[in-house]
Image (spheres, rainbow, N blue to C red):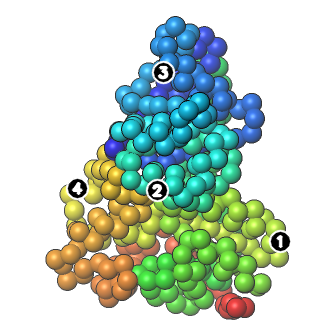
Amino acid sequence: MKGSYHFRVKSKKVLFEFSIKRNITIIKGESATGKTTLLHMMYEYLRVGRESGYSVTTDADYYVYLRREVGRTWEEALYPLKDTIIFIEENNHFVFSKEFAEFVKISGNYFVLVNRSPLKMLPYSIHEIYEIVTDGKHTDIKESYHQLKELYSNYPVAENNKMEIIITEDSNSGFQFFSHLFEKRTVISADGNSKILDQIQKLKTGDILAIADGAAFGSMIENCLEYFATRVSQRISVWMPESFEYLILKSGLIPSKELSDIFASTSDYIEAKEYESWERYFTQLLISMTYDKTYKYSKKILDSYYLQDKHMQKITETFPEAIQNLREEPPETCPTSTN
């Protein structure tokens, strides 16, 4: 399954409108924000159609799992589904299991999970974590209008952060690039996105910039931000591009007529059954585009082509402005890890 799918869910009083474009979408929020109402409307329309008093307009096949049915497990309900967007209500604890994570990986379906707790078994994007908000701008409709709002779209917040220490999740090509790019700073590898917070906690002094692949950092972002808020004497920012490979492709460094179309409608190119996250797609895309070139890309060892100053400059131009400036404004001191 691939592509972006639009939903318009309507009753006489409320209207929900949103699009789903990746294999995993998370809807968060406190009670009484509309999560249960949305799934209930979709479920009843799926069950009895217009007799429900609701309407669901979409270009996708969908299924709503509210709770375990008598005599049928979640596996029996979900495994037969193909090319379907599966909505799962909160308080279904199987979504935290290894078995469910494996099903998500191999099924090829899209999943919309209503859950307030991080789902650490799943690699979901920070750009696909939403809350339901009421929009008062639509004065041309009678219903209360609700849409999904991305929760973590405004990062990095780098105000007054000297970014003396750079922490990367990557221990290979990405780490090699950032070490070369920011050679006047301290650059440390966390050796995996799940270890970024552990590495930050070891550093007692010095402002920090953490760089993580946003395409698979969704389950870690909340714990990180909660911890950052407690470090009043140390500024910590996190930058979450899709992936290091995405930055290279976005820079224009690799000649391709196809890339502009891919970036314009990425979801149309990424088959959920083949790629667990967009990060994996962009990695494979970069490898395939350069496999017969002198600048062949490898995840483990970065070719010197990418470390030439003019090429690093092109890649750097895809960065947020605050991070672009790091090359020209080294701090007076660069503290090191306390581990």
Residue 19, horizontal then vertical, whole percent? 47, 36
Crowd tier of the residue under label 4, counting other residues whose Cα lies within 10 Å: few below 14, some 14–19, many 20 or above: few
Q: Mark 2 points at which residue?
A: 102
N-terminal of the two: label 2 or label 4?
Answer: 2
Q: Name the residue under label 1.
A: 232
Q: What residue type is labelled 4?
A: Glu
Q: Which amino acid does label 2 sit on?
A: Glu
For residue 259, the mark is none
**Label 2's element?**
helix
Q: Name the residue under label 4.
A: 258
N-terminal of the two: label 2 or label 3?
Answer: 3
The correct choice, above or below, for 99 with respect to 335 in the image is above
Q: Quadrant of the C terminus?
A: bottom right
**Contact check, label 1 and label 3, Cβ < 8 Å:** no
Mark 2 to mark 1 CA distance (whole Å): 40 Å
Identified at 23% across, 56% down, the residue is 258
Q: In front of the other: label 2 or label 4?
A: 2
Left or right: residue 182 compared with residue 135 = left
Q: Mark 3 points at which residue?
A: 46
Q: In front of the other: label 1 or label 3?
A: 3
Residue 209, horizontal then vertical, whole percent? 63, 74
Left or right: residue 49 compared with residue 12 = left
